[in-house]
Image (cartoon, helix red, strand yellow):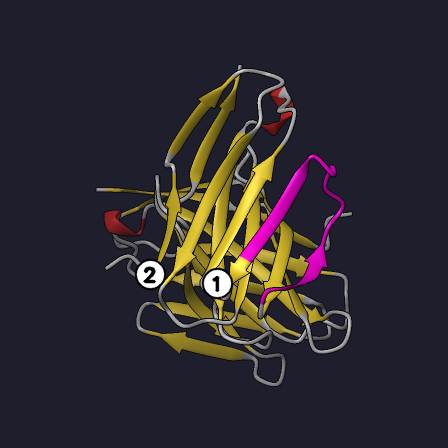
Amino acid sequence: QQQVKQSPQSLIVQKGGISIINCAYENTAFDYFPWYQQFPGKGPALLIAIRPDVSEKKEGRFTISFNKSAKQFSLHIMDSQPGDSATYFCAATAAFSGSARQLTFGSGTQLTVLP
Amino acid sequence: DTAVSQTPKYLVTQMGNDKSIKCEQNLGHDTMYWYKQDSKKFLKIMFSYNNKELIINETVPNRFSPKSPDKAHLNLHINSLELGDSAVYFCASSQGVSHSPLHFGNGTRLTVT
């Protein structure tokens, strides 16, 4: 059972355009929503994260929008650059067995920014 | 200075063999993980150790056995390798079990022929 659904699977954007990746979750116990960026041959790295008590978080060209009632969140990349070409994963975490937490990833979006 | 390092980077082996992947982190974190990334890039947690104790053990064949000799190391041993085990295996670490970010290694690409 996939608890975090991510779309689109792939995205092609022109340089300077806006890239939008969407995620939806089912588990209402999720209380932290990070996005990870993965370049070829590398491990994922934390890009930006949000808690459900805020509707938006912005860091530079990257913005997370969060809709708690719809159980959806999205990543917006403004002024997309070729260097942003990577695979992006949304994720969600909840407490697991006491104090332990488990991170559940979406299926990933392959972003290509054309020069 | 690599924060989370895995060895080997590539591993090609035949079905039925036993192999190990090693992971070390120098971040001083107390929690370490193994994730499996399949050919479609889907990331799935396999194991998590906190202070050398197993805290997450997902539905993984018992051919996979993690071992954590200390907080800085988490190794993965795989017995009787099967074709379906081919994937990229990522080690990761974090501080505590709260919202601290995961720091991933660069992965070990395992190919079983």
Give the percent coordinates (x, y) of residue B34: 56, 50
Residue B39 seen anywhere in this rendered image of the structure = no
User: What span is colored magenta in the figure?
Assistant: B52-68
Looking at this view, is B84 or A86 the one in front?
B84
- In terms of sequence position, does the residue under pointer 2 or pointer 1 come before the other? 2
Q: Secondary structure at mark 1?
A: strand
Please name the amino acid that badge 1 sits on.
Ser
Mark number, residue B3: 2
Horizontal side of residue A42 vs A30, given as left or right: left
Which residue, given by chain and number where applicable, does mark 1 sit on?
Answer: B93
**Vertical order, B17 against A86 (above or below):** above
Tell me what residue is drawn at x 45 percent, y 45 percent.
B22
Cβ–Cβ under 8 Å for marks 2 and 1? yes
Number of residues whose C-alpha sits closer than 10 Å to that of mark 1, classed few (under 14), some (14–19) or many (20 or more)? many
Horizontal side of residue B74 vs A103, given as left or right: left
Q: Quadrant of residue A95?
A: bottom right
Q: Secondary structure at mark 2?
A: loop
Q: Is residue B61 magenta?
A: yes
Chain under callout 2: B
Tell me what residue is drawn at x 59 percent, y 65 percent.
B52
* Separation (CA) of disc 2 from disc 1: 9 Å
Q: How many marks?
A: 2
Mark number, residue A21: none
Give the percent coordinates (x, y) of residue B4: 38, 57
